[in-house]
Amino acid sequence: MPAVRALMGGPAERVVEALLPGLCPCCGQPMGGAERGLCGGCQAVLVPLRGAACPRCGAPADSGEEPCVECRRAPPPQLGAVVWGEHADTLRAALLALKHGRRDELARPLGSRLAAVVAAAGWADAVELVTWVPSHPLRRLARPWCAAELLAREVARGLARPARRLLVRRGLGRQAGRTRARRLLLSASSFRVRRIRGTPTVLLVDDVTTTGTTLQRAAAALTAAGARAVFVACLARTPDPRSMT
Ligand SMILES: [Zn+2]
Ligand SMILES: [Zn+2]
């Protein structure tokens, strides 16, 4: 079983465990009868981000009331953003299991947490439909599902709004023969909008963000295709390198 052997070691062991029913994908412990997705112990240590965040981009900020310096200097295409937690420890392990193990029941405890912060945002009522940042075409070859989509569908359920596949990443085939610099530029910017009816207010969901650039590009594509407004919700943010010592 070379495929399984290749996965063994470190966090990948948890990925293998994530494929086994009845074990918590984060800690590997057997789950109780009523537990779904994550064991009670792991659910208990999932904590949301603390501290103020910029309401426009979701980045850590001095005030949660006003846009951060960066957003005032160059306003991003989305009108608001929420981020639930830090991409570390149990949340990181849970997302890894969701990405690799396709445990749909894991999308529920994670997606419901994200739905709760969206519901608390002042703009939640304006959202008419929910979509997600699609995974890269090469990744989809290995895994036909996408963590962002599973989360978006849970958020849509929590908000009682429809979930629609609106965005497509441009395939690599279109990039053949281009220079490396051009390919990089395209891979960073290559979203197209599949179909969009009317001028809806859209909530764009992703699983992990680092700089927010991908979300901004996807939000810009939606706006260019006719969305009246775009808001953003992301489950996890990679730790700010400036805060690490
Ligand atoms: Zn656990
Ligand atoms: Zn900001």
Image (cartoon, rainbow, N blue to C red):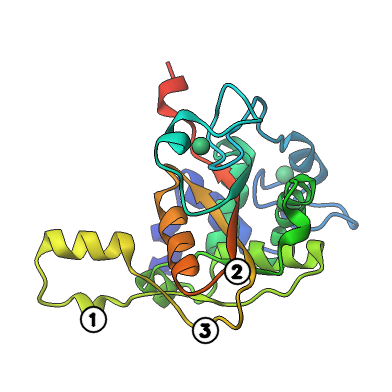
Q: Quadrant of ligand 1?
A: top right
* Disc number placed over residue 195 in the picture, else none: 3
Query: Pointers 1 and 2 in contact (CB under 8 A)?
Result: no
Q: Dot 2: few (<14), some (14–19), or many (≥20) neighbours within 10 Å?
A: many
179 vs 138, nearest the viewer:
179
Give the mark, 1 or 3, whose residue is nearer the N terminus: 1
Query: Pointers 3 and 2 in contact (CB under 8 A)?
Result: no
Residue 110, how many percent across, how many down? 71, 52
State how many labels appear: 3
Q: Which residue is mark 2?
A: 131
Mark 3–mark 2 Cα distance, whole angstroms, equals: 12 Å
Give the mark, 3 or 2, whose residue is nearer the N terminus: 2
Q: Is mark 3 within 8 Å of ligand 2?
A: no
Q: Residue at x 42, y 15 (%)?
A: 245
Position of 129 relative to 185 (above/below): below
**Which image quadrant is residue 35 in?**
bottom right
Residue type of the residue flagged with mark 3: Arg
Position of 221 relative to 171 (above/below): above
Mark 1–mark 3 Cα distance, whole angstroms, equals: 21 Å
* Disc number placed over residue 243 in the picture, else none: none
Residue type of the residue flagged with mark 2: Thr
- Secondary structure beneath dot 1 equals helix
**Front of the two marks 3 and 2:** 3
Q: Which residue is mark 1?
A: 173
Residue type of the residue flagged with mark 1: Gly
